[in-house]
Image (spheres, grey):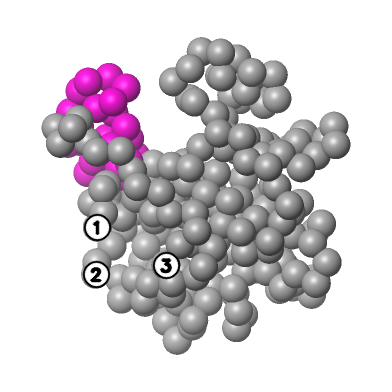
Amino acid sequence: MRIYHHPISSNARRVAMLAAHLGAAVEFVEVDLMSADDRRRLGELNPNSKIPVLEDDGFVLWESCAIMQYLAEKTPGQTVYPQDVRVRADVNRWMFWACQHLSPAIGVLTWERIWKGYVTGQGPDAREEERGESDLADYATVLDKHLAGRQWVVGDSLTLADLALAAPIMYLDQAALPLGGYANLMAWFGRMQQLPAWKRTQQALPPQPAEA
């Protein structure tokens, strides 16, 4: 089984954390997203030309949360994707919410504060930063309220929902994500950072251009 990824992509990290947690036998192939050749080859696997992409004996799957579900289903005895119908539906709900709401809000800020300078040489747009912070505040409030009195997002143990939600928060410091006021969320994120799978997949982000 092969997964095409990049270690500083939060979408790819979701999958990498799960593979590490499960001890899955996976070959990780790093894609240079600045390389035209690598992007062309990536496009042959995923018409969206995005990572991660899983390839398993001729079967190709893209979208990070779909890959996570596939890996869990292929792992006997796993507990991160419970079989109970309602519990699994709850896990799915938070995974979809992460992809539809939390990640895009954080994505606005990571683009403006991290990647935009590399790609365009331009500084952040204050209006876009304000939009991203406003959206993130809305969704952080939802997650923070949900986590009150909870150790994990669903049930009493780690699930795919936790991994899916935590991955984009990897940019907390470098993108200056305004999450310090959400005590329940930050306590949960602290627990995530202590997981062996988090530590094994932690990669230093490149310095911002002004610091290079």
Decide: is 204 above or below 148.
Answer: above
Mark before the other along the chain sequence, 1 or 3 = 1
Q: Residues within 10 Å of mark 1 (few under 14, many from 20)?
A: some
Say left or right for 52 vs 182. right
**Are circles 1 and 2 on residues that touch, CB within 8 Å?**
yes
Q: Quadrant of residue 85?
A: bottom right
Q: Nearer the viewer, residue 34 or 46?
A: 34
Decide: is 195 above or below 131.
Answer: below
Q: What range of the chain is rendered magenta?
A: 108-132
Residue 171 in percent (x, y) is at 34, 50
Q: Residues within 10 Å of mark 2 (few under 14, many from 20)?
A: few
How far apart are the alpha carbons under marks 2 and 3? Answer: 18 Å
Residue matched to label 3: 193
Residue matched to label 2: 181
Q: Is residue 130 magenta?
A: yes
Q: Nearer the viewer, residue 108 or 40?
A: 40
Residue drawn at 55 percent across, 33 percent down = 30
Secondary structure under tag 1 reads: loop
View extreme (left): residue:
210
Decide: is 146 above or below 17.
Answer: below
Mark before the other along the chain sequence, 2 or 3 = 2
How far apart are the alpha carbons under marks 1 and 3? Answer: 18 Å
Q: Main secondary structure of the magenta part?
A: helix
Residue 32 in percent (x, y) is at 49, 26
Amino acid type of the residue tagged 2 in the rendering:
Gly
Judged by depth in the image, the label closer to the viewer, 1 or 3, is 3
